[in-house]
Image (cartoon, rainbow, N blue to C red):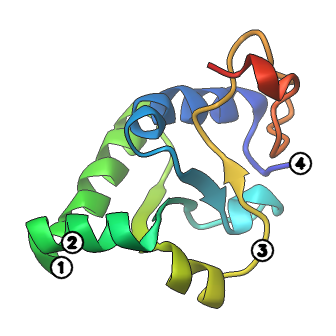
Amino acid sequence: MPALTPRQMWRLDEACRPIRQVFDALYLVGTAQNTRQYRDVDVRLMLDDDKYDSLAAVISPGGMALLGIVFGEYLEARTGLPIDFQVQRNTEANANHPGVRNPLGLRTLANYRGDGAPEPKGRDDVV
């Protein structure tokens, strides 16, 4: 069970929904998933290598960092949580950061369990 309360998890999911609809690869990672003591809430946008490379080519490495800051600020404003948002390339993310990833932006009232479990109940009903 995440360290986040059910209400915090709901707000985070709701705030992540538009990002998920555009990019389809958004996850809660890190200590906020499994410990009551966390400094920030780690949210990662993990893109297929070719998508990451295409986006980075258009907006530059500084643009990728700015994208992380902008999405982080948006999520902080919507949730009240201290968000650390990063855009990552799948190959490096998988090689350097193994572990549990909790998909964000998938839970709806129809499948919300209230416990922030990584897989929403009734995954086929996800909008």
Q: CA distance from mark 2 to mark 3?
A: 25 Å
Q: Amino acid at mark 4?
A: Met
Q: Which element is circle 3 on?
A: loop
How crowded pointer 4 is (Cα within 10 Å; few <14, some 14-19, many 20+) is rated as: few
Question: Is residue 29 visible from the viewing direction of this image?
Answer: yes
Q: Earlier in the sequence, mark 2 or mark 1?
A: 2
Q: Earlier in the sequence, mark 2 or mark 3?
A: 2
Please state the total of marks drawn on the protein image: 4
Q: CA distance from mark 4 to mark 2?
A: 34 Å
Q: Amino acid at mark 3?
A: Gly
Q: Earlier in the sequence, mark 1 or mark 4?
A: 4
Q: Which mark is residue 99?
A: 3
How crowded pointer 1 is (Cα within 10 Å; few <14, some 14-19, many 20+) is rated as: few
Mark 2, residue position = 56
Q: Residue 77: image x %, image y %? A: 35, 36
Mark 1, residue position = 61
